[in-house]
C-alpha cells in the first residue's frame, strides 16, 4: 500500500508541476498573443490616424472634417463659370440644383431674372454642360440628396426658393436680410464665410449686425 501511495503522489506531482502548469502557461501566452495582436492593431490604427491628421495639417490647408465629401457640396472648379456668372453674383455650386433647373436657367439667359445675361454659344455650351454634369443628381454630397427629395418633380430656378433652403433658414427673419451687409437671400457669402468652398455648416456662420 505504501508503494502504491508513493506512486500515486509521484504521478500527481508530475502531472501538476510537469504537465499542467506548462500547458496553462502556454494557453495564457496564446491568449495574450491573440489579444495583444488586436490591441497592437488598434494602437497602430490610432497611430495611423494621428499620422494622417498630422500629415494633413502639414499641408497648411484648413480642414473641415472627414465628412467633406459626404456632407459639404463640391466647390466650383470651372474657371469659365466663375468668370461669366460669378462676376455678377455668387457662383452657386452646381449640386445645389438638379439638372432640369440648370438646363432651364441656361436656356433663358436672355431673360435672366430681369437681365440679359446672354453669352456666346461656345461659352454657353461649356457652362451648361458643367452645371448639368455636376448637378445634385451626380453629387456625392449628402445635402444634395436632401435637396432632390425636397424638390421632387419641381424645376426651381432659384435655390433660395426651394423648400430645402426655406427650411434651413426658417429662423432668419426679413429684417436680418435687409441689413446693409446682406441685402439679399442670394448673398450666401455674407453669412456663410466658407460658402465658396461648398461648406455651409452652422459653425462657420457669422450673421452681420
Image: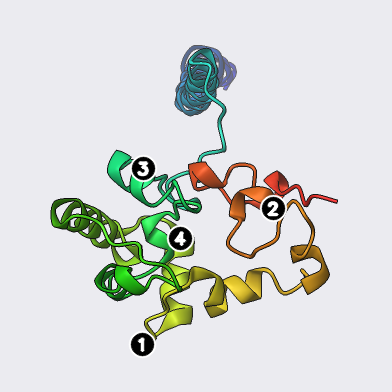
Alpha-carbon span between mark 4 and mark 2: 16 Å
Q: CA distance from mark 4 to mark 3?
A: 28 Å
Q: CA distance from mark 3 to mark 2?
A: 28 Å
CA gap between label 1 and label 2 equals 28 Å
Q: Is residue 35 above or below residue 120?
A: above
**CB contact under 8 Å: marks 3 and 1:** no
> Which secondary structure lies at badge 2?
helix
Q: Secondary structure at mark 1?
A: loop
Query: Which residue is under mark 3?
Result: 83
Marked residue nearer the N-terminal end (4 or 1) = 4
- The quadrant of the picture occupied by the N terminus is top right
Task: Give the residue at mark 1.
Answer: 153
Q: Is residue 110 above or below residue 84?
A: below
Which of the two labelled residues, at mark 1 and mark 2, occupies the earlier sequence position?
A: 1
Q: Where 3 sits versus 158, above or below? A: above
Q: Residues within 10 Å of mark 2 (few under 14, many from 20)?
A: few
Query: Which numbered disc, 3 or 2, marks the residue closer to the eye?
Result: 3
The residue beneath circle 4 is 142
Q: Residue 93, how many percent across, how many down?
A: 42, 54
Do the residues bearing badges 4 and 3 touch, measured as CB atoms within 8 Å? no
Secondary structure beneath dot 3 equals: helix
Farthest residue toward the right? 209
Residue ID for mark 2:
202
Q: Is tag 4's residue or tag 2's residue first in the polypeptide sequence? A: 4
Q: Which mark is residue 81?
A: none
Amino acid at each position: 500500500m505504501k508503494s502504491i501511495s508513493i506512486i500515486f503522489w509521484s504521478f500527481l506531482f508530475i502531472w501538476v508541476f510537469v504537465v499542467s502548469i506548462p500547458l496553462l502557461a502556454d494557453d495564457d501566452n496564446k491568449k495574450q498573443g491573440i489579444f495583444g495582436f488586436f490591441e497592437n492593431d488598434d494602437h497602430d490604427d490610432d497611430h495611423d490616424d494621428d499620422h494622417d491628421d498630422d500629415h494633413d495639417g502639414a499641408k497648411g490647408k484648413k480642414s473641415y472634417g472627414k465628412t467633406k465629401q459626404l456632407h459639404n457640396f463640391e466647390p466650383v472648379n470651372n474657371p469659365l463659370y466663375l468668370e461669366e456668372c460669378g462676376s455678377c453674383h455668387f457662383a452657386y455650386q452646381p449640386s445645389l440644383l438638379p439638372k432640369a433647373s440648370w438646363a432651364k436657367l441656361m436656356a433663358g439667359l436672355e431673360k435672366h431674372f430681369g437681365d440679359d445675361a446672354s453669352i456666346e454659344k461656345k461659352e454657353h455650351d461649356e457652362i451648361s454642360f458643367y452645371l448639368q454634369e455636376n448637378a445634385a443628381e451626380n453629387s456625392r454630397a449628402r445635402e444634395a440628396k436632401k435637396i432632390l427629395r425636397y424638390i421632387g418633380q419641381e424645376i426651381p430656378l432659384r435655390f433660395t426658393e426651394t423648400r430645402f433652403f426655406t427650411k434651413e433658414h426658417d429662423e432668419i427673419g426679413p429684417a436680418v436680410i435687409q441689413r446693409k451687409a446682406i441685402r439679399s437671400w442670394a448673398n450666401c457669402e455674407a453669412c456663410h464665410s466658407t460658402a465658396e468652398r461648398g461648406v455651409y455648416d452652422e459653425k462657420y456662420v457669422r450673421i452681420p449686425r
